Every structure is written in structure tokens, then in C-alpha cells.
Image: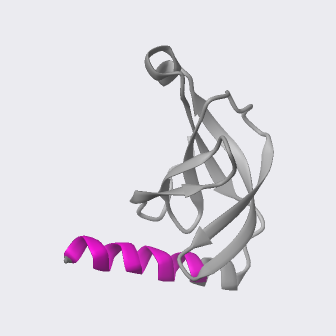
Amino acid sequence: MEQRKEQRADLTHDIVLDDDLHARNLSESGIQIQSSRALTVGRELRVQLDLGDERISVIGEVRWSSVHLAEASGQYVSGLVFRNQNSSDILAIRRYLATLEDESAD
């Protein structure tokens, strides 16, 4: 199994990807999302991220999906890896993650 290279930041406020997809944590290379429906491994989704003052659009490929949470809460958790990032997307995510670090240090 491929291991992630970057640290992930838990999100203290919700990033809504659409009506049913909510971000749980974020790194430069991927995102963990929660939804009310199962996502198929290998499926690609266009992900619009509002990162404070910036908005980016990337393709995320579902790498894993966990249904065990669905039994208790009706929710699924999935991990997506970003596929079409450019350098400006990566920098936007870095800046956003830096603001989260600053908030947690206060």
C-alpha cells in the first residue's frame, strides 16, 4: 500500500465540496472526505476547494473507502489523491495549511 508523504491537517472548520461531500483533512497530495454515499475506488471526482481567499479545482481519485462508519452514523469516509495538480494549486494548499497551523498555535 502506498504511504502518504506529507502530513495531513485535520480541518477545524468544514470545507464543503458539494452538498454531500465534506472535507475532514487535507494534505498537499490528497484529501479525506466524508459523505452519505459510498465512493467507488478508482473513481475520479472534480474537487473544488475553497481555501480561505483562494479557490482551486483539482481531480481527486478515490484510493480507499471505509463503510464501517456508515453502520453507526450513516456516513462513509474516503481518501482521495489529487491527480492534476499544478504548482499554483500546491502553493495554494501550502498557504492554507500554514494558516491552519497558525490558528492552532494561537
For the N terminus, give its image quadrant: top right
Q: In the rendering, at what x and y percent does residue 12 appear?
A: 37, 59
Q: Residue at x 73, y 49 (%)?
A: 61
Q: Residue furthest top?
A: 71
Q: Residue at x 57, y 83 (%)?
A: 53
Region in magenta: 92-105
Lateral position of residue 29 relative to residue 69, left or right: right
Q: In the rendering, at what x and y percent does residue 55 appear?
A: 67, 75
Q: Residue at x 58, y 84 (%)?
A: 91
All told, the count of numbered labels is 0
Instruction: Reply above or below: 103 against 19.
Output: below
Tell me which corner region of the image, top left, top right, bottom left or bottom right, holds residue 10. bottom left
Say which of 73 and 105 sits in front: 73
Q: Residue furthest left?
A: 106
Q: In the rendering, at what x and y percent does residue 26 appear?
A: 50, 60
Lateral position of residue 39 relative to residue 51, left or right: right
Say which of 4 and 48 sits in front: 48
Instruction: Reply above or below: 40 against 56.
Output: above
Instruction: Find out whether residue 34 is within the magenta segment.
Output: no
Q: In the rendering, at what x and y percent does residue 59 appear?
A: 77, 59
Lateral position of residue 97 relative to residue 74, left or right: left
Secondary structure mostly taken by the magenta-highlighted segment of the chain:
helix
Tell me which corner region of the image, top left, top right, bottom left or bottom right, holds residue 88. bottom right
Instruction: Find out whether residue 95 is within the magenta segment.
Output: yes
For the C terminus, give its image quadrant: bottom left
